[in-house]
């Protein structure tokens, strides 16, 4: 008897799956739930599991806060630049690493890995100095510049796996048809990397969207804060912490990422495995 | 989970396909270097100078006065001896390693378990679990931090309320952040919660590519689930596991933001520091950049030692 | 599409290359500060969140820009979170330093000593001279020169529930021991039968509240002996204070184990929910107290008592200093802006808008003549600051004292931990 298909087994698995899913979705639910209840319900010692004391008030406060919009713009701008630049640079680099054997190749591959291990916290003052000397403090470009450098190594690594998966013969036949080598990369390989670009792009996006400490050190003017700084700014020193606002703000901060994930979900899932399997 | 048909084969573990024709590439070709240039350049621009400066400062007496213009003296290995002679550093190191290993191990275990579970679920449940994973993964770090602080809040937190409701009266109003052990328990739950989805997705994606016929054949041969898992599943997904393990170790050892923010919620800072927050505290907020830089270099060395075995194994497997 | 991405890449690569070439990455050239008032400048001012009201900000900007046509003054609000690293990096940069900065008074000595701030000794008289809050002048000075002027000050007073005191027949405590006794009786009495009731709301994380016990007993956090600093939590005076505190946390307060700094900075929350009979807060917290309690006349306040009951106790001197960055390129204009900050209208905004005691005590009367203001000014006058040691900010960021009081709140061993904390303070304070 094959145990695999036994209905008892199956429903046991389903129940475990349900519990697993519930555990993981709970914090997300809790965030949304708490962003939708009144302050009284929020402050009460008995948690409310459903938004019965419903209110949009927290969202209204946040959406009327000009600092939220400027932080959103800032975060989007930075994330966009980081994704585009990191993907492009990583695409070129992974072509080089995947299609050629050259001197220093191994060194580059090892560096790609080791760079990710360097603790960032001790470099902040030097990076501040650098960005400052280029007059890029408090700017989208300055922050993006640093984030691109931080996410390119990982992006290369992921993307290389996908490039490896595209048969080199395809490029070669395109070259016979009169394409240059680089032209073949773009015409043939690039379009075939769809899910790989999505998966690695997601990582670059998340890294930029989430980064907190470097932004904390680098950004000081009111209209250059990113979303993580804006969220942290909610807990004031002598003011009552606006938990409702924090919850609403955190939800709004998560929303673009969730939408993005849902859109690219299929490609991402394909991308993850292919990128990982091949170093 | 189908793969675009235009691509030869998705797994890429089959070694025959992509091997570049060797002879042509032996010739000195400037193209790969040109292709690498933008990436190398941006990394050098971003990290080259800071890293050089960090290495220099590690051998200098460099504190606030130097930051405000006083010339810095070289002090040899002073900073290193100071770090290595500081018991707080060793405690922090031990804490970081323990935290990293616990988180990485649990994340991997839960992630692999979750992925295997996914293959056994009926469709609606599977979709639900995947949606939950996706949502958890999409949550920005700062958002997660806020909601976890709220979940474990001693006043209005749902965890204390539930535990008290289950009869553990002592847990009513329990402050999770004031005791280092429970502080790290919350931090670990948060970190694991955030990292499991990636592991689940990657492992699941590779598990689903295992040839069904192989499994069927082994079932006919009388192999039980565990044996199948060991003999077929593990070898197939090994490269993925290796990669994810390396990443988890690197990420968990470097954990910063989560601890940094939770520390503001209380807890005795000295007993809740991990390497990242320790470097930050000594350097950026303590103003002793020399010692902070030395600590960071030591930290890099430790990460290298810790992952080197996996890295070489990985490089071999990936036949780079 | 393909064409576009290639061009985009070239553009980006070009920009990056140019940036790399432009950067010398070295120290910028010496500060060419202009003391001239005729060259227009764009002043940047860093105020901390919630310290200067919108009204006061608008006033300052308008006055300044009217007076110095062509120049502008921009106020950038900073979070307390991570302010020390920010000041360390920004003040050191001739390119992007803010011109005027507010400094938490406990951070002031450090920045005065390392050469980050411009010398203000020459204009001390003009800013208020002898009327400037003394404890803040001390913290803002280094080697007899004033670098950071007193901005505003505040000290905690005790708020209490009049109705509960009355019901239990309690009088306002005159000594610290009486305060403990009163807290214990309210907690035991729990007149409203609140399940989470605490006689006095005093979270362990709020070390600045706990300083009142140490200072009033004559203890200090650290003392200077023969030019060397020494941690002083083990002194008999400090130990006496800690014994009193732990007694309070044992019998008169259930809140010693609270470590959430946001709850700690909002002590009125527990008061509003009926969970505390007393709390130790600032005068402006009165506005945060629930209307029903105020309207019923149930809220009273008194000064922190002394050990013997013969005077007002010595709470911690909270507040800020204000300074000009040594790297500012428009020090002349910055000084003019500073004069505006120390003029009557701006100083009075602190009192009327924020409830703070202005740095120039001459204008403290603007707080009003009511009992609350009287009590507050008394508290500020007898308040004591943290040690005016160059490295005090480092002790703070290493959380030596905070960690110590959190442990005390959890009723851990006062003697051993004080010794450890003292040793750590001594090391940090005397390191170069």
Image (spheres, rainbow, N blue to C red):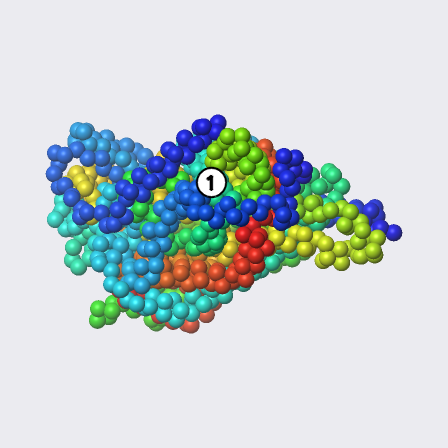
Residue at image location 42% in from the left, 66% down from the top? B88
Give the percent coordinates (x, y) of residue B280: 39, 56
Quadrant location, the N terminus of chain B: top right
Tell me if mark 1 has few (under 14), some (14-19) or many (20+) residues whose alpha carbon lies within 10 angstroms of its own: many
Pick the front one: C199 or C8:
C8
Residue A156 visible, this orientation: no
Looking at the image, residue B176 lies above or below residue C355: below
Residue A142, quarter of the rendered image: top left
- Residue in the image at 17% along x and 59% along y: C143
Instruction: Please provide percent x and percent y for residue C401.
Output: 38, 61
Q: How many marks?
A: 1
**Residue at left offset 64%, top offset 42%:** B10
Residue A65, located in which quarter of the rendered image? top left
- Classify residue B296 by image quadrant: bottom left
Between A185 and B158, the residue placed more toward the observer is A185
- Left or right of A40: which side holds C172? left
The picture places residue B301, in percent across and down from the top left corner, at 44, 62
Of all chains, the one bearing label 1 is: A
Residue B110 lies left or right of residue C267; in this view the side is right
User: Residue A139 placed where, x, y %?
Assistant: 35, 37
Residue C431 visible in the current orientation: yes
Q: Residue at x 68, y 52 (%)?
A: B236
SS state under label 1: helix
Is B273 displayed left or right of B190 in the figure?
A: left
Q: Is residue C294 above or below residue B66?
A: above
Circle 1 sits on which residue? A92
């Amino acid at each position: 008897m094959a145990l695999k298909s036994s209905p008892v087994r199956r429903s046991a698995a389903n129940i475990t799956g349900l519990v697993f899913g519930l555990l993981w979705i709970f914090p997300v639910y809790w965030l949304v739930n708490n962003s939708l209840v009144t302050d009284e319900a929020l402050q009460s010692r008995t948690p409310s599991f459903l938004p019965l004391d419903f209110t949009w008030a927290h969202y209204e406060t946040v959406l009327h806060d000009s600092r939220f919009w400027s932080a959103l713009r800032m975060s989007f701008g930075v994330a966009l630049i980081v994704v585009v630049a990191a993907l492009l640079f990583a695409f070129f680099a992974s072509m080089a690493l995947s299609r050629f054997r050259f001197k220093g190749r191994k060194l580059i591959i090892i560096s790609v890995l080791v760079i990710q291990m360097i603790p960032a916290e001790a470099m902040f003052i030097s990076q501040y100095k650098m960005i400052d000397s280029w007059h890029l403090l408090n700017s989208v470009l300055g922050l993006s510049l640093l984030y691109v450098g931080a996410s390119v190594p990982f992006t290369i690594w992921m993307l290389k796996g996908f490039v490896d998966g595209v048969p080199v013969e395809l490029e070669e036949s395109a070259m016979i048809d009169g394409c240059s080598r680089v032209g073949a990369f773009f015409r043939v390989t690039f379009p075939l990397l769809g899910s790989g670009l999505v998966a690695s792009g997601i990582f670059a996006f998340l890294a930029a969207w989430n980064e907190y400490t470097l932004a904390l050190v680098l950004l000081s003017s009111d209209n250059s804060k990113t979303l993580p700084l804006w969220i942290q700014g909610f807990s004031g020193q002598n003011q009552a912490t606006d938990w409702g606002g924090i919850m609403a703000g955190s939800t709004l901060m998560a929303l673009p990422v969730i939408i993005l994930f849902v859109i690219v979900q299929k490609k991402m899932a394909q991308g993850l495995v292919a990128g990982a399997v091949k170093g | 989970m189908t793969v675009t048909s235009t691509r030869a084969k998705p797994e890429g573990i089959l070694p025959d396909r992509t091997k570049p024709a060797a002879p042509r590439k032996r010739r000195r070709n400037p193209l790969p270097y040109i292709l690498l240039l933008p990436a190398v350049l941006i990394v050098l621009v971003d990290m080259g100078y800071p890293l050089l400066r960090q290495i220099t400062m590690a051998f200098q007496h460099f504190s606030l006065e130097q930051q405000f213009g006083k010339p810095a003296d070289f002090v040899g290995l002073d900073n290193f001896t100071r770090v290595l002679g500081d018991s707080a550093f060793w405690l922090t190191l031990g804490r970081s390693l323990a935290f990293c290993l616990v988180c990485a191990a649990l994340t991997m275990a839960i992630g692999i378990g979750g992925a295997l579970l996914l293959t056994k679920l009926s469709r609606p449940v599977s979709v639900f679990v995947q949606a939950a994973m996706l949502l958890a993964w999409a949550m920005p770090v700062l958002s997660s931090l806020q909601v976890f602080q709220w979940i474990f809040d001693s006043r209005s937190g749902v965890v204390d309320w539930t535990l008290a409701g289950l009869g553990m009266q002592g847990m009513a109003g329990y402050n999770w952040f004031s005791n280092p052990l429970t502080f790290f328990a919350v931090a670990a739950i948060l970190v694991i919660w955030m990292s499991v989805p990636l592991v689940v997705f990657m492992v699941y994606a590779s598990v689903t590519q295992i040839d069904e016929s192989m499994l069927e054949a082994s079932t006919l041969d009388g192999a039980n689930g565990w044996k199948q898992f060991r003999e077929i599943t593990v070898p197939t997904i090994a490269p993925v596991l290796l990669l994810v393990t390396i990443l988890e170790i690197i990420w968990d050892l470097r954990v910063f933001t989560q601890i940094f923010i939770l520390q503001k919620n209380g807890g005795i800072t000295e007993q809740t520091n991990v390497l990242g927050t320790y470097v930050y505290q000594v350097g950026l907020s303590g103003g002793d950049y020399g010692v902070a830089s030395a600590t960071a270099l030591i930290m890099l060395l430790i990460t290298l030692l810790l992952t080197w075995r996996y890295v070489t194994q990985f490089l071999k497997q990936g036949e780079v | 599409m393909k064409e576009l991405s290639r061009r985009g890449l070239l553009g980006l690569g070009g920009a990056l290359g140019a940036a790399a070439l432009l950067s010398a990455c070295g120290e910028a050239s010496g500060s060419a500060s202009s003391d001239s008032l005729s060259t227009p400048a764009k002043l940047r001012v860093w105020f901390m969140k919630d310290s200067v009201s919108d009204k006061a900000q608008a006033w300052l900007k308008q006055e300044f820009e009217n007076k110095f046509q062509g120049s502008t003054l921009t106020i950038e609000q900073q979070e307390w979170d991570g302010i020390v690293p920010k000041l360390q990096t920004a003040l050191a940069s001739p390119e992007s330093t803010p011109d005027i900065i507010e400094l938490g008074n406990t951070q002031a000595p450090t920045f005065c000593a390392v050469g980050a701030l411009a010398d203000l000794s020459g204009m001390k008289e003009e800013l208020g001279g002898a009327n400037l809050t003394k404890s803040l002048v001390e913290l803002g000075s280094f080697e007899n020169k004033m670098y950071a002027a007193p901005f505003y000050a505040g000290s905690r007073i005790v708020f209490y529930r009049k109705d509960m005191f009355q019901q239990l027949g309690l009088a306002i405590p005159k000594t610290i021991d009486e305060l403990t006794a009163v807290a214990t009786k309210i907690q035991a009495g729990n007149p409203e039968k609140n399940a989470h009731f605490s006689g006095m709301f005093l979270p362990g994380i709020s070390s600045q509240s706990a300083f009142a016990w140490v200072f009033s007993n004559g203890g200090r956090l650290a003392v200077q002996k023969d030019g060397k600093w020494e941690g002083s939590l083990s002194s008999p005076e400090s130990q006496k204070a800690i014994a009193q505190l732990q007694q309070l946390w044992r019998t008169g307060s259930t809140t010693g184990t609270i470590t959430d700094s946001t709850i700690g900075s909002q002590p009125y929350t527990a008061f509003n929910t009926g969970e505390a009979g007393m709390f130790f807060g600032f005068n402006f917290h009165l506005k945060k107290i629930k209307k029903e309690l105020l309207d019923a006349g149930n809220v009273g306040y008194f000064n922190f008592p002394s050990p013997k009951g013969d005077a007002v106790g010595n709470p911690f001197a909270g507040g800020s200093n204000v300074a000009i960055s040594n790297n500012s390129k428009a020090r002349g204009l910055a000084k003019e802006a500073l004069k505006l900050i120390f003029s009557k209208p701006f100083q009075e905004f602190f009192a009327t808008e924020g409830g703070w005691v202005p740095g120039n005590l001459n204008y403290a009367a603007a707080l009003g003549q009511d009992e609350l203001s009287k009590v507050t000014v008394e508290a500020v006058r007898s308040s004591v600051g943290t040690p005016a040691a160059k490295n005090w900010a480092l002790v703070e960021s290493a959380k030596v004292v905070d960690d110590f009081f959190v442990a005390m709140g959890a009723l851990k061993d006062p003697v051993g931990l004080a010794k450890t904390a003292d040793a750590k303070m001594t090391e940090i304070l005397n390191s170069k």
